Image (cartoon, grey):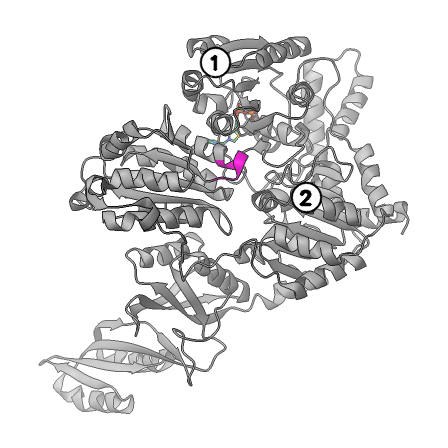
Amino acid sequence: MNKTSALLLYEQGAWHGGFFRVTNTIMSQIQQQHTITVLVENHAGVLARVAGLFARRGYNIDSLAVSVTDRPEISRMTIVVNGDHRVLEQITKQLNKLVEVLKVVDYTETASVERDLALIKVNAEPHHRGELMQIVEIFRGRIIDMSDKTFVIEVTGGTDKLDKIIHLLEPYGIREMVRTGIIAMARGAKTATRSGRDMD
Amino acid sequence: MQLSGAQILLECLKREGVSHIFGYPGGAVLPIYDAIFDCKDIKHILVRHEQGAAHMADGFARSTGKVGVCLATSGPGATNLVTGIATAYMDSIPMVAITGQVRTSAIGKDAFQEADITGITMPITKHNRLVKRVEDLPQALAEAFYIARTGRPGPTLVDIPLDVSRNLMEFDVNRDYPQQVNIPSYRPAGPTARVPDVQVRKAAQLIAEAERPVLYVGGGAIASGAQAEVTALAERTNILVTTTLLGKGAIDETHPLSIGMLGMHGTAYANHATNGADLLIAVGARFDDRVTGNVEKFATGARIIHIDIDPAEIGKVIQPDVPIVGDVKAILAELLKIVQPRPATAWNDQILEWKERFPLIYPNDGKLYAEYAIETVNEMFDYQAIMATDVGQHQMWAAQHFKCKRPRQWVTSGGLGTMGYGLPAAIGVQFANPDKRVVCLSGDGSFQMCTQELMTAAVYGLPVITIVINNRSLGMVRQWQEMFYEERYSQVDLQASPDFVKLAEAYGGVGMRATTREELRDALAKAIEVTDRPVVIDCVIPTKENVYPMIPSGQSIKEMMLRQDLEQVKASVHADAEQWSFADEERVLEQYVEAVHSAGSEDASGG
Ligand SMILES: Cc1ncc(C[n+]2csc(CCOP(=O)(O)OP(=O)(O)O)c2C)c(N)n1
């Protein structure tokens, strides 16, 4: 290419090699809910670091569960976030930069089991108790406390299942509810703590 | 031997090779200062404000690549470090900040001078830690240094409660200081890490296929010491090199393949080159918004090779075609083994033609301008001075006109843009480089943010030369108000400043004023003779000077404003008018700004 034609093309904005970037942008705009597991050193302040990272970079946490693991020096966080492919990639990479983060695993594309546990305090007038017990039965929940006006129902399952039972209980009057947030684990022999590849 | 936490701290610092601590005492660090009283091997520099200590440690680090160390007491001492820590964090500068803390039993009780400094600095440190037991101190320090200098460098902070530095413990640095740090959750790529050769081969392939390649080199190249590799790659392939504000010095800027800085105030030719490229080789750079402007319109025709040690930078702003994660120097060395030489092409001619057509210019009316002062520094110091800058127009003029022959000759706050950085940074540089001349280029606004450190320079007999580009104004903000806020000049006129000449003298330095080119040359010549105290040159320039070229924030190369265009409009107005007056100047600017930039700017953040 001689130099004047190069300049002309450039000035007309006619150099198009931007194909890759355009497709990437479209692909990356698909919003999705992701369940990620973050293994961290069990130090004071780690939760603040992780939470601070999400706040500072503008990522929203839908739910967060923290617990001990089979190894006392390691804690496990399960975080549900909403975002497109690129946001998730950034979250993963930024988490990995925290010195105390050992590993980040995204379960979105792996076969995994996910569980959430809810405690629901619902109005239980005597004439509704039969119906309520049936609902609890169908959802394999348990009534773990009972007073003359209320039940406390315990139910575990995936997000959908819990959403459904909550929906069904609403007409009776839910007085109080608490959920643990999703915890997740890969199916099969693979474990997050001992094997598997670091996500980067 | 039984040592106190404070003594252990100093033993560990010595072991880390620390030669200077920039600090300021207070209640919570009394035991540490008591240990410093006996310490012969480390020089403690007493600053005048903790912000100065942090910037000095930063300047020390930038000019050497070593870890800079600063020390402050709890509460206000620690919070005064914050701006300096954030400055270092944004520019990936290795630094260890040590802060005193109230005694462990008082933590959380709002004790006198208690501040949760680990909480406060969580988002502006690479890592930080409150040490609750003296037994943990050696490990905490070893990790702090290791984390600060490895991978993508950055500041770390170690918070030491009063009782921890007082408590005794059996300690022998040779036996008890960790020889090696092993943090399972922190595995940075290093110079010896395996280079991803598949990616390197792909990169070589793209380079071979490219017709219009450009090397875009950032601070990562400086951090990894890759000047030789960058230069070799450019020479082997005849690819022209543009650097970012922090990449200055990654190639000798007088090298024929260097085309200066790109971005908002980059050279027109560097910006034309990047935007016209079909291949952008980003080396230790992060596609900062001051570089890209509107990302959607940035280098749209280019494939991108992105080399960076921080995986999180890959795809953060722009998705590269070939990402290569690792140490820049190591990767370039691999690339050099396989990359095919290419001759200079028509593309090189094109860029050089742009360079000829749109050179960096400033009025040649014989008056004194910042650009002239900077070029005179190049010349009179034979391109050997280390320059530290403050933030504003003068910084951008320096970025354009100061020529680095080598890395670490250029010390500036890029990511955070911290006014007040220049003087203390220059002092840190001078401590690290006693045999070199250090010039601080400041503005009349910025200089007044850390002037007190002139006293530090005077006490330690440092011949730091500060050139205050005095436009009686917060120039950069004034420029934005002129261009994007209809000349509604709000709080940018400084109205009065101290007499900088007398001020310098009051601190025990030398003060001089320059209002003409000759006076400036004289003043610099005299300054060069001064070797035992700071010099301040009050360099008086016109108020209404602007930095060109300029691509307004969030816009693209299409909106680039050039001084050449301004001069043209000026000339045409001039031709119409009988006599040139100041009013004409105003009118010219108005017309120019309207014509080139009617759209205005959506982003009102100056710098
Ligand atoms: C600590 C701080 N406060 C405010 C700003 C915003 N700011 C950017 S440039 C500038 C003006 C700088 O004036 P001066 O130092 O005189 O330099 P000039 O632009 O006139 O060369 C200001 C206020 C900043 N960058 N840093």
Say whether mark 1 is within 8 Å of ligand 1: no
Q: Is residue B472 above or below residue A184?
A: above
Q: Quick check: B396 above or below B243?
A: above
- Which secondary structure, mark 2? helix
Horizontal side of A70 relative to B256 (left or right) equals: left
To which quarter of the image does residue B323 belong? bottom right
Q: Is residue B305 above or below residue B546?
A: below
Which residue position is annotated with label 2? B228
Q: Is residue A41 left or right of residue B276?
A: left
Up-down relation of residue A36 to residue A140 (above or below):
above
- Magenta segment range? B61-66
Q: Position of residue A80 (x, y in %)?
A: 40, 69
Q: Main secondary structure of the magenta part?
A: helix
Which mark's residue is nearer the viewer, 2 or 1?
2
Residue annotated with mark 1: B496
| Position of residue A48 measured from the top left corner of the image (x, y, whole percent) | 32, 55
Choose between B528 and B535: the one closer to the eye.
B528
Amino acid type at mark 2: Ala
Chain containing mark 1: B
